[in-house]
Image: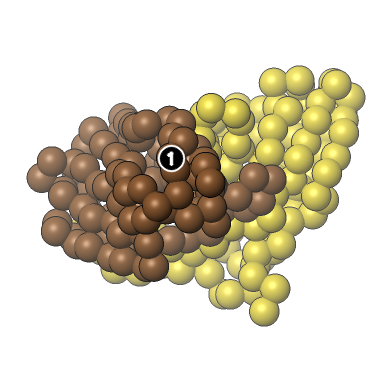
Chain colours: A yellow, B brown
Amino acid sequence: NAGVTQTPKFRVLKTGQSMTLLCAQDMNHEYMYWYRQDPGMGLRLIHYSVGEGTTAKGEVPDGYNVSRLKKQNFLLGLESAAPSQTSVYFCASSFRTSGRTGASTDTQYFGPGTRLTVL
Amino acid sequence: ELKVEQNPLFLSMQEGKNYTIYCNYSTTSDRLYWYRQDPGKSLESLFVLLSNGAVKQEGRLMASLDTKARLSTLHITAAVHDLSATYFCAVEVGNEKLTFGTGTRLTIIP
């Protein structure tokens, strides 16, 4: 099993350009997530998905769009890149498990990351 | 809004010493995770703590959870250089997602 993979690993964009980051997982996980990591700020959730065809906003969704057309793939799009979107982007996935109050996320498995620079 | 605070943010410690990293969170949650990140690498799961009083141990690391105090600790025993990394706690929010602390960068000095 490859686990969680991300494409590309590195990318440099000019302001205003667009791009799509691909996340793929082969663990049959229901839940998938996109985070960004900036120095001194930990990981912040951009968007997430609890199943094929569903998406939801996280903490910092502005400037990003996502799609989950297949269960194993989760795409993150930047329509018009800005320097503030320079960051390391991590994808993660997890099983859905049962918590005290209903369905719950389980341990999240992370991809290797994509380092994006916007000039 | 859930807030997750870790302290200290930076920690330098000598090999062989013991120390504790603290993770405080602001609202009720029953699931807390600890992750490790090496420089330039991805995050690796260390522990998941599922209930009040839960304790997990792996090698020189031991994590505990007190849901009443909204506090988790990661205790390092007799530190070795290989434990140098950034450690994150993460708290489950609304059953579907996690909120991460800002991380504790641990450096073990020979």
Q: Which residue is mark 1?
A: B13
Between A26 and B38, the residue placed more toward the observer is: B38
In the image, residue B86 lies at what x, y percent? 51, 43
Mark 1: amino acid: Met
* Disc 1 packing (10 Å; few <14; some 14–19; many ≥20): some
Identified at 30% across, 44% down, the residue is B20
Residue A81 vs A20, above or below: the answer is: above
Identified at 32% across, 44% down, the residue is B19
Q: Mark 1 falls within which chain? A: B
Identified at 76% across, 20% down, the residue is A83
Q: Is residue B66 left or right of residue A67?
A: left
Q: Quadrant of residue A10?
A: top right
Q: Name the residue at the bottom extreme.
A: A1
In the image, residue B55 lies at what x, y percent? 22, 63
Quadrant of the snapshot with the C terminus of chain A: top right
Residue B86 visible in the snapshot: no
